[in-house]
Image (spheres, helix red, strand yellow):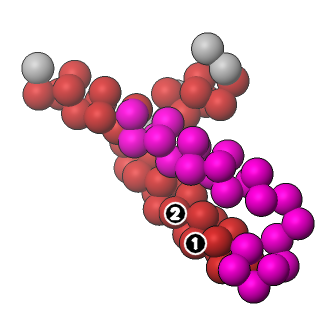
């Protein structure tokens, strides 16, 4: 398991949701910069999308633990 996932697992639910919101904002800004040709490294968009997926997965796991 990579370090980022371990760090995310240690966070409480409200902070995970805040991170998700912040990461969505970051993705929006990256897409905006890409559209205006100000983004040099377009691979950052993929990295941020994967970070969002990781957070969503962890939130879903927490939800399953609480319900089941």
Q: Is residue 50 above or below residue 19?
A: above
* Span colored in magenta: 34-57
Q: Which residue is mark 1?
A: 28
SS at mark 2?
Answer: helix
**Which image quadrant for residue 56?**
top left
Identify which residue is drawn at 47% across, 41% down.
Answer: 53
Are there few (<14), some (14-19), or many (20+) residues within 10 Å of tag 2? some
- Residue 32 position, x and y percent, is 66, 79
Q: Position of residue 67 (x, y in %)?
A: 11, 28
Residue 50: in magenta span: yes
In terms of depth relative to the viewer, which is nearer, 32 or 54?
32
Q: Are marks 1 and 2 in contact (CB under 8 Å)?
A: yes
Q: Which residue in the structure is indicated by mark 2?
A: 24
Q: Quadrant of the N terminus?
A: top right
Query: Where residue 50 sits in the image (x, y, percent)?
Result: 57, 42
Q: Residue furthest bottom?
A: 36
3D distance between C-alphas at marks 1 and 2: 6 Å
Quarter that holds the C terminus: top left
Q: Which residue of the protein is positioned furthest toward the right in this rendering?
A: 40
Residue 41 lies left or right of residue 2; in this view the side is right
Tell me: 26 left or right of 8.
Answer: right
């Amino acid at each position: 398991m990579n370090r980022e996932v371990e760090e995310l697992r240690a966070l409480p639910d409200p902070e995970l949701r805040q991170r998700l919101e912040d990461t969505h904002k970051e993705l929006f800004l990256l897409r905006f910069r890409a559209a205006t040709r100000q983004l040099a490294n377009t691979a950052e968009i993929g990295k941020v999308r994967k970070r969002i997926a990781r957070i969503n997965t962890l939130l879903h796991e927490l939800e399953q633990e609480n319900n089941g």
